[in-house]
């Protein structure tokens, strides 16, 4: 059961117009037309993944009426950890004072929160865990190449945190689906700067430690895989599209979101969209959207919400939850 969600973003909003100030040749029109993005948040001095995730976590805990000391586990989906070792989840654990919680990261890129919820459900089913914090958080601004207009306009920073409790009868996860395809790993990656090619002067000079992406290929795969995932979520829950009260898809690009909704047969009035204000925050995008939707009172008890994610790996998946 998703008991409560909170979200946090860095202080600074960076608009499409701001790219001119850093010498990136692009335009508000180009970015909006192709992606639907108008601005994104960018971490500044004193802000990092730990601080943003901790802020989101505190809001979620407060909304759930749970103390940090009650947490049995903290699972953080991220592709932009503060350090390569150890996991950022343990830093969040320390910041929260969640002394009992086992803490670890999941690197499933944009699917990280969705994978995390499914891992949490598994731990509850088999491991005696009662209360788990699942966070999707990213500081992508530190791993994108701000000179590469193909990628730097797309991404943003932020975190969403969800307190997960054991499902009660009739409420909770009705269906869950996860997939991966590593044969397509090269299409969206950070090519160098880690184990297979450690950081050196050449990597730094060519910027191959930053995210690279074959945009059109990623687009096609995202549309195909998210459509399939939406079908699986409905089948698994034995529901039809008209039973879904709200679709919360990964917020990568408005065109991908519209294609997913159209395939699933869900009208756009029932789709939560905030990519215009946050950009693509990868693992954080779904929980930020969920947190906003709940703040706006869009999700009432008994409603069916469908989540669909897709990201680097490729990884993708879906879930239907009855609130
Ligand atoms: N501003 C202006 N022009 C640009 C920019 C920019 N920011 N970026 C690229 N261009 C130019 C290109 O250089 C190219 O110019 P050329 O024809 O002279 O070579 C032209 O625009 C067209 O580029 P395309 O890549 O063909 O543009 P496309 O219509 O495919 O849109 C986009 C690019 C937006 C990246 C699209 O492919 C896309 O949305 N892909 C999905 C990527 C995505 O969302 N990834 C997120 C991670 S995965 C996930 O979260 C699902």
Image (tube, grey):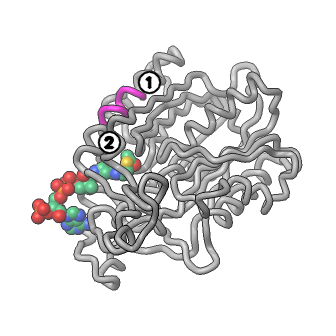
Please, is residue 119 above or below residue 152 in the view?
above
Q: Quadrant of the N terminus?
A: top right
Does 230 lie within the magenta span? no
User: Is residue 253 visible to us here?
Assistant: no
Q: Which mark is residue 183?
A: none
User: Is residue 321 visible to us here?
Assistant: yes
Main SS of the magenta part reads: helix
Please, is residue 272 above or below residue 207 in the view?
above
Of residue 194 and residue 17, the one placed in the foreground of this image is 194
Q: Which quarter of the picture shows residue 43?
A: bottom right
Does 223 lie within the magenta span? yes
Who's the residue at 31% across and 29% down the image? 263
Which residue is the site of mark 2?
258
Which residue is the site of mark 1?
242
Earlier in the chain: of badge 2 and badge 1, it is 1
Which region is colored magenta? Answer: 222-229
Query: Where does the image place residue 174, in percent across and percent down from the top left?
Result: 60, 22
- Disc 2/disc 1 C-alpha distance (Å): 17 Å
Q: Which quarter of the picture shows residue 190?
A: bottom left
Is residue 118 shown left or right of residue 316? right
Of residue 183 and residue 303, the one placed in the foreground of this image is 183
Mark nearest the camera among 2 and 1 is 2
Label pair 2/1, CB-CB below 8 angstroms: no
Who's the residue at 75% across and 28% down the image? 124
Query: Where does the image place residue 62, in percent across and percent down from the top left?
Result: 79, 54
Please, is residue 43 above or below residue 265 in the view?
below
Query: Where does the image place residue 302, in percent across and percent down from the top left?
Result: 64, 28
SS at circle 1 = helix
Ligand 1 visible in quadrant: bottom left
């Amino acid at each position: 059961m998703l008991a409560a969600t909170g979200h946090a973003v860095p202080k600074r909003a960076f608009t499409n117009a701001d790219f001119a100030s850093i010498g990136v040749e692009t335009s508000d029109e180009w970015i909006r037309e192709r992606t639907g993005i108008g601005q994104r948040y960018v971490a500044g001095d004193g802000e990092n993944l730990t601080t943003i995730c901790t802020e989101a976590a505190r809001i979620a805990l407060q909304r759930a009426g749970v103390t940090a000391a009650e947490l049995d586990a903290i699972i953080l989906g991220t592709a932009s950890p503060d350090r390569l070792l150890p996991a950022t989840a343990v830093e969040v654990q320390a910041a929260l004072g969640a002394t009992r919680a086992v803490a670890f990261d999941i690197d499933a890129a944009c699917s990280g929160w969705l994978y995390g919820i499914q891992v949490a459900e598994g731990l509850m089913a088999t491991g005696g865990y009662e209360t788990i914090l699942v966070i999707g958080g990213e500081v992508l601004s530190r791993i994108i190449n701000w000179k590469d207009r193909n990628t730097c306009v797309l991404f943003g920073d932020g975190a969403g945190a969800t307190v997960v409790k054991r499902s009660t009868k009739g409420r909770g996860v009705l269906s869950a689906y996860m997939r991966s395809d590593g044969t397509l790993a090269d299409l969206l990656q950070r090519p160098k700067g880690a184990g297979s090619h450690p950081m050196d002067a050449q990597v730094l000079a060519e910027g191959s430690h930053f995210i690279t992406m074959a945009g059109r290929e990623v687009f096609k795969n995202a549309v195909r895989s998210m459509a399939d995932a939406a079908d699986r979520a409905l089948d698994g829950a034995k529901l039809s599209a008209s039973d879904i009260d709200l679709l919360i898809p990964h917020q990568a690009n408005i065109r991908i979101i519209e294609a997913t909704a159209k395939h699933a047969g869900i009208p756009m009035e029932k789709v939560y969209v905030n990519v215009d204000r946050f950009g693509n925050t990868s693992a954080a995008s779904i929980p930020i959207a969920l947190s906003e939707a709940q703040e706006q009172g869009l999700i009432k008890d008994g409603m069916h919400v469908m989540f669909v994610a897709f990201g680097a790996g490729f990884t993708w998946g879906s879930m239907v939850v009855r609130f």
